[in-house]
Amino acid sequence: MKKILEIHQYGETDIRFHTDLKPSEKTESIPGLVASVAFAMMTSLWGGNERDILAIIRALAIADLAVSVNREEMISLMDQDSRTFAKLIRDARKSFERNGGKAIFFEPGITPGKTKS
């Protein structure tokens, strides 16, 4: 098991981050991580706490952009990358459905039933 991201708050301003990954040393690992995270977000609904998790992820992104030297460039790069990944995910889902698979979408806050398919 790898620790992707762990965040602890020890006080109002004492927030510490920990990870086992070293993307600065292995930049080629990021696309695979994005794909894995996107797959988890689409399939498991994060155990029903996706609203809370997404709020934290967005807070991290906003904080990152707030301290970025070049916000506009960072936003542009994130937009391009997310557009590319969105297309890949849509294409994979369409292929899955063409081959007889069925995708079921749940609204935020709704967890799938406990029965297994």
Image: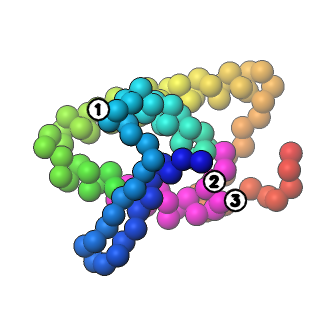
Distance (Cα) linking label 1 and label 2: 27 Å
Q: Which residues are magenta?
A: 43-59
Residue to which mark 2 is pinned: 45
Which residue has dot 3 on it?
111
Residue 86 appears in the figure:
no
Q: Amino acid at mark 1?
A: Leu
In the image, taking residue 76 as reference, residue 2 lies left or right, namely right
The three-letter amino acid code for the residue at tag 3 is Thr
| Residue ID at (69%, 59%) | 111
Residue at image coords 18%, 38%: 72
Q: Which quadrant would residue 55 be assigned to in this image? A: bottom left
Crowd band around label 3 with a 10 angstrom C-alpha radius: few (<14), some (14–19), many (20+): some
Residue occupied by mark 1: 77
Tell whether position 57 is magenta. Answer: yes
| Residue 85 percent across, percent down from the top left | 47, 30
**Which of 79 and 5 lies nearest the eye of the viewer?**
5
Q: SS of the residue at dot 2?
A: helix
N-terminal label among 1 and 3: 1
Q: Which mark is residue 91?
A: none
Q: Position of residue 44 (x, y in %)?
A: 66, 50
Q: CA distance from mark 1 to mark 3?
A: 32 Å
The one nearer the camera, 41 or 33, is 33
Residue 79, located in which quarter of the rendered image? Answer: top left
Q: Would residue 64 be counted in the magenta stretch?
A: no
Q: Residues within 10 Å of mark 2 (few under 14, many from 20)?
A: some
Residue 94 visible in this rendered orientation of the protein:
yes
